[in-house]
Image: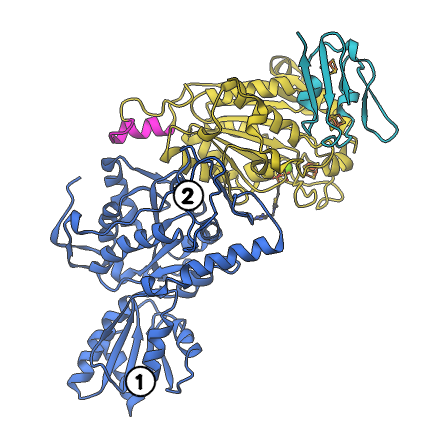
Chain colours: A cyan, B blue, C yellow
Amino acid sequence: MVSEPRKIRIEIDKKSCKRCGICQGLCPQAVYSLAKDGSPEITNPERCTNCRLCDLRCPDFAITLEVLA
Amino acid sequence: MNRPVGVQFMQGNEACVYAALDAGAKFYGGYPITPSSEIAELSAKFLPQVDGVYLQMEDEIGSIAAIIGASAAGQKSYTATSGPGFSLMQENLGMAVYAEVPLVLINVMRNGPSTGLATRPAQGDVMQARWGTHGDHPIIALSPGSVQECYDLTVRAFNLSEKYRIPVILLGDEVIGHMRESLTIPEADKLEIINRKLPTVPAQGYKPYQTDEDDIPAIPPYGTDYIVHISSSCHDESGYSHSAPQTADKLVQRLHRKIDKNKKDIIQVEWFGPEQADLTIIAYGAISRVAKQAVINAQDKGLSVNLLRLITLWPFADEEVKAALEKAKAILVPELNLGQIVHEVERLNTFGPPVHSLSRIDGEILIPAQIMEKIEEVLK
Amino acid sequence: MALSYKDYLEQSQLPHMWCPGCGDGIILRAYTEALAELNLAPKDVVTVTGIGCWGKADDYLSTQAFHGTHGRALAFATGIKTANPDLTVVTLMGDGDAVTIGGNHFIHAARRNVNLTAIVTNNYNYGMTGGQYSATTPLESKTTTSPNGVAEPGFDVCFLAEAAGANFVARTTVYHAVALKNLIKEGILHPGFSLVEVISPCPTYFGRFNVHPSPVNMMNWLKEKAIPVQKYRELPLEEQHEHFAVGKLVKKDRPDFYTTYRRINGGKKGAEEGDTNGR
Ligand SMILES: Cc1ncc(C[n+]2csc(CCOP(=O)(O)OP(=O)(O)O)c2C)c(N)n1
Ligand code: SF4
Ligand code: SF4
Ligand code: SF4
Ligand SMILES: [Mg+2]
């Protein structure tokens, strides 16, 4: 899944994700929501401040944040 | 450090240290214990003089771990211990076999079990040297019978260890360790020194445990361009964990194969006395010296006795012992234990001569007269 | 070219074996991020692991690696580092590895002040073998071998390291992922023995029995328990008992083992400068 807001590109590698919910549960900006099966969805990408808490806290290296020029 | 050369007079333990330094050892990790402590003390004195390190660890578990680490980092490494310390080293001895890290472990055997008689000799660790660590594994153990052999076999222990990437145990005993006698230390350029082989393939895509037909991996020390992954867990050729049944089987089979097919190179024995005799003594370590004297005394009495001295204890000298069993009318195995090597001899005895054991476990050494008495009883 | 954390991961070995929400993956990420920011080549770093869930970390790394026996990582690492002081040596140990079966090596490595870094993942139990209690499990916690609560108090890993003489001692949690990465960097750079204790969730066992099985709740629990060290020291004792201090606890400049050994004993190699790695 890929989302491209103005500045920050968030990518979740669904193959690596183990659906622990940490990204959704701890994002200070409520960028994520959880689908019925527990996998994270990027619902409010424009709110991301690139605090990096989600990618550094993802235990499965599933999140990539990229600051777009 | 002034390297002694030519005829010298010293203790067995001392000779081990000079030999280790001559073999290129740069790292000692150990925990003092009688009757091996002289090896620690001399190593502490000499190693810094050759840019090496003496590291006194907190126990023997840590001691063998430290020398495994130092060896993986490229230094030839050794430790010395005795009974209780040897017991503590067993788990990591197995790791060194499994991960193919060269090292030399000098065990100066003392009376046991447990703390036992700390200052008295024994040969009670022979089976522990073979089977002390868990799981199927090969091992090399050498047994010196003189101060000269303390020197020669320590050099050889390093050479075999480096060549086959396996820990080598120098299984001495209190008598040989503390005995003083003369020996000849060769000129440095007369010594054969073997160093572990290094990879010839490119660093990119290198697999540390990939081997040629010789079944021996070429693993460089940490810090070169090659990435080395060393593991105590079941690993494939990459060194990374791999738990498939075939991987487990393949690894342990190869570990045995690399030793089994080189038994000729590894196994050393010495025959003493007449080529053909009614009784053959099979002995090792301090007791093989006593047995030599017994052979001479027997000859003086007109008895037909010879000696097969086992210099390499493990892998066991099957072929040589079979030859003895085939030729002699009786076999005598004197040991400072209740019978350990004698069972190996019996295992091979499809030839029929009676195999006799002579034991002593009171912390005293067997003397020629006791062996003589047994010879006369057997040949009666 | 700048290195990325991915350059230190062995991609062919991923995904890793850890449970969903296990803190181990977060610490591995922080460790590899730290190596990348320090620009250390994988070939110059030896990662030494023990046995346990966290002890599996070497299998996911592309650095030089040594996966030893349970509890002995620091003893192997002491040999590696002393034999070649140019290497950067980092040991990864669980609470069982570091201060239970390996407690003796832990205090002695700190006392010797061997120039290496220990990243101790404290999940308050033996994750690997099914959630039994360890020497850090808090008094009265329930584990699979203390169904009614453990009757022994747990060690304070940082106190232990400090008392034994470690040069650098820090504690943080996986909740504090950025601080974690920075403390690992600082630990690696600081000469002598460095400890970074990371309080980490084992949602599968310790969490399920004592806190909550949900990874998010475990993360929030860590956040509540952790108090920055300055603030922690001002808390009344009863409150201190309910929390733990995070941040840098000790930073000293005692000379490391190798440097001291060479100063006293001589030896050509490094006799003047000792171990210059990490300075
Ligand atoms: C000598 C020895 N004893 C016991 C074990 C079994 N064992 C493997 S891992 C482990 C505990 C691991 O706990 P910890 O170090 O806290 O790591 P975690 O799994 O929690 O990350 C034990 C007891 C072993 N491998 N070796
Ligand atoms: S933190 Fe990582 S593994 Fe957990 S749900 Fe989010 S993307 Fe998946
Ligand atoms: S970087 Fe911060 S704000 Fe952006 S999605 Fe991740 S946790 Fe939320
Ligand atoms: S058992 Fe606990 S420590 Fe082990 S992987 Fe699972 S959550 Fe992590
Ligand atoms: Mg644990």
Q: Chain of mark 2?
A: B
User: Which residue is situated farthest in the left direction here?
Assistant: B7
Nearest to the observer: residue C131 or residue B322? B322
Dominant secondary structure, magenta? helix
- On whether residue C4 falls in the magenta region, the answer is no
Q: Which residue is mark 2?
A: B219
| Numbered-mark total | 2
How packed mark 1 is, by other alpha carbons closer than 10 Å (few <14, some 14-19, many 20 or more), is some
Disc 2, SS? loop
Image coordinates for residue B261, horizontal then vertical, percent: 40, 63
Whether pointer 2 and pointer 1 mark residues with C-beta atoms closer than 8 Å, the reply is no
Image coordinates for residue B5, horizontal then vertical, percent: 13, 49
Vertical relation: B271 (above or below) A26: below
Q: Nearer the viewer, mark 2 or mark 1?
A: 2
Vertical relation: C163 (above or below) C152: above
Nearest to the observer: residue C252 or residue B364? C252
Name the amino acid, label 1.
Answer: Lys
Instruction: Give how far apart the Cα atoms at labels 2 and 1 are.
Output: 45 Å
Circle on res. B327: 1
Circle on res. C258: none
Image coordinates for residue A41, horizontal then vertical, percent: 82, 22
The C terminus of chain B lies in quadrant: bottom left
Q: Is residue B371 left or right of residue B224?
A: left
- On whether residue C262 falls in the magenta region, the answer is yes
User: Which residue is situated farthest in the bottom direction here?
Assistant: B380
The N terminus of chain B lies in quadrant: top left
Q: Chain of mark 1?
A: B
Q: Which residues are magenta?
A: C257-270
Disc 1, SS? helix
Q: Is residue C211 left or right of residue B79?
A: right
Q: Is residue C192 left or right of residue C150?
A: left
Residue B309 is at least partly visible in this image = yes
